[in-house]
Image (tube, rainbow, N blue to C red):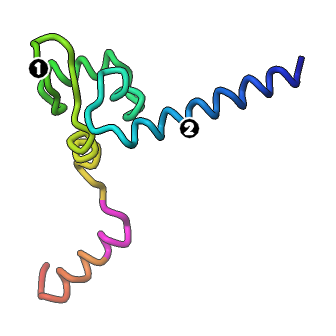
Amino acid sequence: MQQQIYTLQHLIDKIEILTQAVLANKNTLTLDECAAYTDLSTSHLYKLTSSGTIPHYKPNGKKLYFDRSEIDAWLRQNRVSTRAEIEQQAADHMAIGGR
């Protein structure tokens, strides 16, 4: 029985790897694919689309589609600086006579 569980988990892991490989090569994503790609729930994606927070397309006014490059850019918004970057900015500011 334990061997079967391990085998099932192994298959699930392989499917996940293959799914990610397919999504990485696809430029236009469906709602479910976008949810898997971003690790967001479909209900949260619906909320983001209805509020106009996330870029998306509705070619026939119903089904949602997402451009992967736009989603990547959206995910990389609001970058948080590292402590080293903040310290460098402070040092640069002090070097030019900042207060």
Instruction: Please tell me which residue lies in front, 35 or 67.
Output: 67
Q: Is residue 74 above or below residue 40?
A: below
Q: Position of residue 25 (x, y in %)?
A: 37, 42
At a point 49% along the width and 32% down the height, the residue shown is: 19
Q: Quadrant of residue 26?
A: top left
Q: Main secondary structure of the magenta part?
A: helix
Q: Position of residue 74 (x, y in %)?
A: 22, 42
Horizontal arrangement in the rendering, residue 16 relative to residue 98 (left or right): right
Specify the amino acid type for callout 1: Pro
Earlier sequence position, callout 2 versus callout 1: 2
Which residue is denoted by mark 1 in the rendering?
Answer: 59
The quadrant in which the C terminus is found is: bottom left
Horizontal arrangement in the rendering, residue 31 relative to residue 59 (left or right): right
Q: Quadrant of residue 46?
A: top left
Horizontal arrangement in the rendering, residue 2 relative to residue 10 (left or right): right
Label 1 neighbourhood size at 10 Å, few (<14), some (14-19), many (20+)?
few
Q: Quadrant of residue 3?
A: top right
**Residue 47 is a magenta residue:** no
Q: Which residues are magenta?
A: 81-87
Q: Secondary structure at mark 2?
A: helix
The quadrant in which the N terminus is found is: top right
At a point 78% along the width and 26% down the height, the residue shown is: 7
Instruction: Please tell me which residue lies in front, 95 or 51.
Output: 51
At a point 23% along the width and 49% down the height, the residue shown is: 78
Label 2 neighbourhood size at 10 Å, few (<14), some (14-19), many (20+)?
few
| Residue that extends furthest to the top in the rendered view of this protein | 62
- What's the mark number on residue 17? 2
Specify the amino acid type for callout 2: Ile
CA gap, disc 2 and disc 1? 30 Å
